[in-house]
Image (cartoon, rainbow, N blue to C red):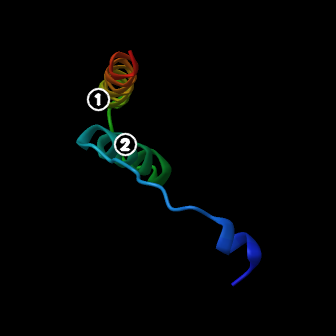
Amino acid sequence: MTNQDKERKPFEVKLTDDHLLLIRTLLILERGEDMSDQMLRLNIQRAIAHINFVRWKESTCSNSSAS
C-alpha cells in the first residue's frame, strides 16, 4: 500500500436506473450491437435529463437548507 492509497478518501456513488441505462447504452455501442439510432438517442437523452434533474434538485435542496 502506497502513501497515495492511504490518502484516498472513500466517496459515495449514487447510481440510479438512469445511470444504469446510460451505462448499458454505452456498452451496447462499444460492443457494436444493433440498436436503432432513435432508441440510442432516446436512451441517452432520457438518462442525461434525469441525471441533470437529480443534480438540480440536490443543489436546490442544499441551497435552501443553507439559508
The image quadrant of residue 40 is: top left
Can residue 38 be seen here? Answer: no
Nearer the viewer's eye, disc 2 or disc 1? 2
* Residue 23 coordinates in the image, percent (x, y): 39, 47
Rendered residue at 40%/23% (across/down): 59
- Outermost residue toward the bottom in this view: 1
User: In the image, what residue occupies the spot 33% across and 22% down?
Assistant: 65
- Residue closer to the observer: 62 or 49: 62
- For image coordinates 29% across by 29% down, the residue present is 39
The image's mark for residue 39 is 1
Q: Residues within 10 Å of mark 1 (few under 14, many from 20)?
A: few
In the image, what residue type sits under mark 1?
Met
Name which residue type carries label 2: Thr
Placement of 55 over or under 30, stated as above or below: above
In this rendered view, identify the residue nearer to me: 11 or 52: 11
Name the mark on residue 25.
Answer: 2
Question: Circle 2 sits in a helix, a strand or a loop, which is it?
Answer: helix
The quadrant in which the C terminus is found is top left
Q: Based on the displayed image, in which of its 4 quarters is residue 36 positioned?
A: top left
Horizontally, residue 1 falls left or right of residue 20, namely: right
Q: Is 39 or 59 nearer to us in this picture? A: 59
Q: Residue furthest right?
A: 3
In terms of secondary structure, where does tag 1 sit? helix
Q: Looking at the image, tell me whether mark 2 or mark 1 is earlier in sequence order.
A: 2
3 up-or-down from 65: above or below: below
* Residue 11 image point, x, y percent: 48, 56
**What is the crowding at mark 2: few (fewer than 14 residues within 10 Å), some, or many (at least 20)?**
many
